[in-house]
Amino acid sequence: MMGMYIFLASEVMFFGSLFAMYFYMFGSHPLGWPPPRTIPINWWPLPAANTVILLSSGVTCHYALDSIAHDQRARFFVLLVSTILLGVAFEVGQGYEFTHAHISFSGLNQFGSAFFTMTGFHGLHVAGGLVFLLLMLGRALRGHFNGRHHVGVAAATLYWHFVDVVWIFLFGILYLAVTAV
């Protein structure tokens, strides 16, 4: 677990630098943010639904860990598979949003560049978390985890909660703050 904590500390620094870049750009635009002629993505309905989906996956992941810790294997499998499916649904929603956004990923649109960079890296982290969860599912199917031995599942759960927390900040800053009236 110590390795996961150290890894997550480096991830906090990575996302911290992305947020610092965003706030620097925000502060560098005295005429307002996002820049003129930028149509930000409204937080309703798709981003809000995606947020509920991702946060729900955090709940199912938490209870999956609790289930394996109490040797409730059937419940663990249902909850872990639910977590994976919810994570895939989030990625599909993000993919749809990327392909239908009215902002561009270019140097001419700083908000668009920041938006796609920040949400894109988050999406890559979610994809990495899905790989991690699939590996845990495969190991669990081979009987590698039980109530006494489940550090891998605990590490995957900790990582999954990290991507949830990052999304809360991204949602608040990139969606709510720029479209709230």
Image (cartoon, rainbow, N blue to C red):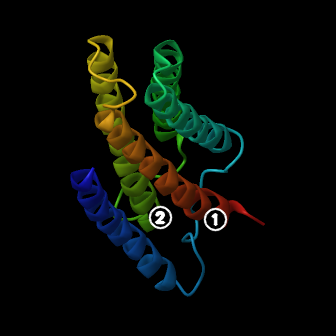
The residue at which mark 2 appears reads as 111
Hey, which residue is sitting farthest right in the picture? 181
Quadrant where the C terminus lies?
Answer: bottom right
Q: Nearer the viewer, residue 155 or 34?
A: 155
Q: Up-down: is 167 above or below 54?
A: below
Q: Residue at x 24, y 60 (%)?
A: 6
Q: Nearer the viewer, residue 136 or 13?
A: 136
Proximity of marks 1 and 2: CB atoms separated by less than 8 Å = yes
Residue 120 percent location from the top left of the image: 38, 47
Q: Tag 1, which secondary structure?
A: helix
Identify the mark at residue 178; answer none if there is no mark: 1
- Please state if 31 lies on the left or on the right of 162 as rendered: right
Q: Residue at x 52, y 58 (%)?
A: 170
Whether residue 114 is visible, yes or no, is: yes
Q: Residue at x 61, y 61 (%)?
A: 172
Label 2 is placed on what type of residue? Answer: Phe
In the rendered picture of this protein, how many numbered marks are placed on residues? 2
Whether residue 105 is visible, yes or no, is: no
Tell me how far mark 1 sits from mark 2, CA to CA: 10 Å
Residue 50: quarter of image: top right
Label 1 is placed on what type of residue? Answer: Val
Q: Tag 2, which secondary structure?
A: helix
- Please state if 19 lies on the left or on the right of 139 as rendered: right
Circle 2 packing at 10 Å, graded few (<14), some (14-19), many (20+), is: many
